[in-house]
Image (spheres, rainbow, N blue to C red):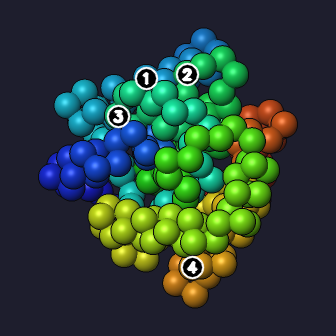
Amino acid sequence: MSVSKEKFKKIKSKYQYLSSWAIWATEGETPKSNVGDLTILDPDCNKNLLSQLNTEVVFVALNISRGDIKTPFGNFHDHRPAATDFKIRFAFKDTPFWGGYMTDIIKDFEEKISGKVKDYLSKNRDFEKQNVDIFLEELNDIGAKNPVLIAFGNEVFNILNRHLKDRFKIIKVPHYANYTNKEKYREQIKTILKF
């Protein structure tokens, strides 16, 4: 699987602050080193990038927890010390899922506490449905034909299952912010996805 340069530019133009790709710079001195190095997602800097991208694997999180993403594809590549994005890199490095597309099911809804998002959605089912429709448009825009949807956590899984269980294969994995170390997280992922 790969993505053409033209398709990559279109995706970047429309979704650059909402999405990303499951590719990170190599770990440095610490487990969190280089997570925020986004030159890895620049085809002019990383000549192998386009051949690594895979729109048939789509990672789905709930919503953006920080609204200050100002760098293209900065979502899921948070360099801040408190961030846990490094666990995703560790879990999926050297697996068939490396290079997948990454996005949130709920757009433009900044909230760190997932319980508050869940409460809002339970009272605003139309808003949830609108976001699922936006997600389907996004899948179409990236050229996904029959993607496997990998849901980070219960709430995302429940939303995807409610609306899309008859259309896509949906696999639930633990959220990367769960209190576990990166090694245990990778083992959990490995058991679920069988790689």
Residue 27 rendering spot, x and y as whole percentages: 55, 23
Residue 149 rendering spot, x and y as whole percentages: 55, 66
Mark 2 secondary-structure assignment = loop
* Residue type, label 3: Pro
Q: Residue beneath label 1, please?
A: 37
Residue 8 rendering spot, x and y as whole percentages: 24, 49
Decide: is 37 above or below 190. above
Decide: is 166 above or below 50. below
Contact between marks 3 and 2 (CB within 8 A): the answer is no
Q: Earlier in the sequence, mark 2 or mark 4?
A: 2
Q: Residue beneath label 3, please?
A: 72
Q: Is residue 126 left or right of residue 118?
A: left
Q: Which mark is residue 23?
A: none
Q: Earlier in the sequence, mark 3 or mark 2?
A: 3
Q: Residue beneath label 2, please?
A: 79
How packed is label 4: few (under 14 Cα within 10 Å), some, or many (20 or more)? some
Contact between marks 2 and 1 (CB within 8 A): the answer is yes
